[in-house]
Amino acid sequence: MRILVGCEESQVVTKELRKLGHDAYSCDILDCSGGKPEWHIKGDILPILKKDWDMLIAFPPCTYLAVSGAAWFYHPDDFDLDIKDRRPHPKHPNRKKFRKDALKFVTDLMNAPIERIAIENPIGSISTYIRKPDQIIQPWQFGDKAQKSTCLWLKNLPKLKPTNIVEKGEFFEWIDSRSGKKKRQPLWFYQALQKAKTPEERRTLRSKTFPGIAEAMAKQWTKGKFLKQLNLFEEEKKCTFNFNDCDNLKHDFCNDCDEGDNYEKF
Ligand SMILES: C[S@@+](CC[C@H](N)C(=O)[O-])C[C@H]1O[C@@H](n2cnc3c(N)ncnc32)[C@H](O)[C@@H]1O
């Protein structure tokens, strides 16, 4: 199959697909770090979506979409106010616009003219403004001892079946000096923060796909059985989101989110 792995600089999924003999390419605005530049398309993914792919697996940026970033939308002094009365965060006045742009990017990926599509993102605004995910998975269900709630939005692809359930991994706990409250983060996430030297490096390290999930995506989404079940004549449903509604962020899944306590509780 000809498969585009969008927004992937690590090439983790691309390499798993190649192992199975697929004609897979990663695409990212960054250089690839996976060591296979011949399988990497460096640049914006949007113009190449029409190039006759059988499948798209995409990992769009979550900087302005993840629920863990919601604390940066509003002025820190306004947290007790109703959402409609809060001022923008003084250091991030354009955050809402960036979220709209990020949601538009995701809808463009979801509406790509490709028969099978999987979009991956953490818990956040996609569920609120576009639609709820078809599945939420964890690395520990696929052999990696780590907790990271990972949502999947699927078109003509089956839900992933856990391959190897292991322990959830350790957490790092500390007392926040500002609020005096106890906080905790998965250890792998905390270590990525410590290891990184720049904010960009921090983002890249924390967003790499876990190997067990990558292997499951490659194997389970290219198996022959379900591919025959496609109804190619079914009418396409386009995804949309309500731009005007972007002030009223509320979320169903926050109590599942252990990726840093830096998010607003709704
Ligand atoms: C959340 S990270 C996903 C990383 C991925 N899980 C991996 O293992 O490489 C999002 C990625 O999207 C890339 N990106 C952002 N805008 C893009 C665009 N318009 N076209 C292609 N890639 C883009 C970023 O450079 C970043 O590497």
Image (cartoon, rainbow, N blue to C red):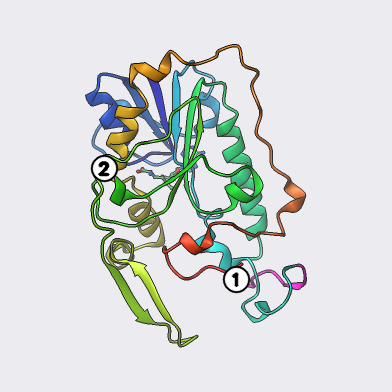
Picture mark count: 2
Amino acid type, callout 1: Lys
Is disc 2 surrounded by few (<14), some (14 to 19) or many (20+) residues within 10 Å? some
Q: At which x and y percent is residue 254?
A: 53, 61
- Residue bearing mark 2: 211
Whole-number angstrom distance, CA of label 2 to CA of label 1: 36 Å
> From which residue to which does the magenta span run?
84-90
Front position in the image: 159 or 176: 159
Sequence-wise first label, 2 or 1:
1
In this view, 137 is above or below 110? below
Residue at the spot 76% in from the left edge and 67% down from the top edge: 84
Q: Position of residue 135 (x, y in %)?
A: 47, 42
Camera-near label (2 vs 1) is 2
For residue 265: magenta?
no
* Residue 30 found in image quarter: top left
Q: Quadrant of residue 197?
A: bottom left
Q: Quadrant of ligand 1?
A: top left
Q: Is residue 11 visible?
A: no
Q: Which mark is drawn over residue 91? A: 1
Q: Position of residue 251 (x, y in %)?
A: 60, 58
Image-quadrant location for residue 71:
bottom right
Which residue is located at x 73 percent, y 47 percent?
243
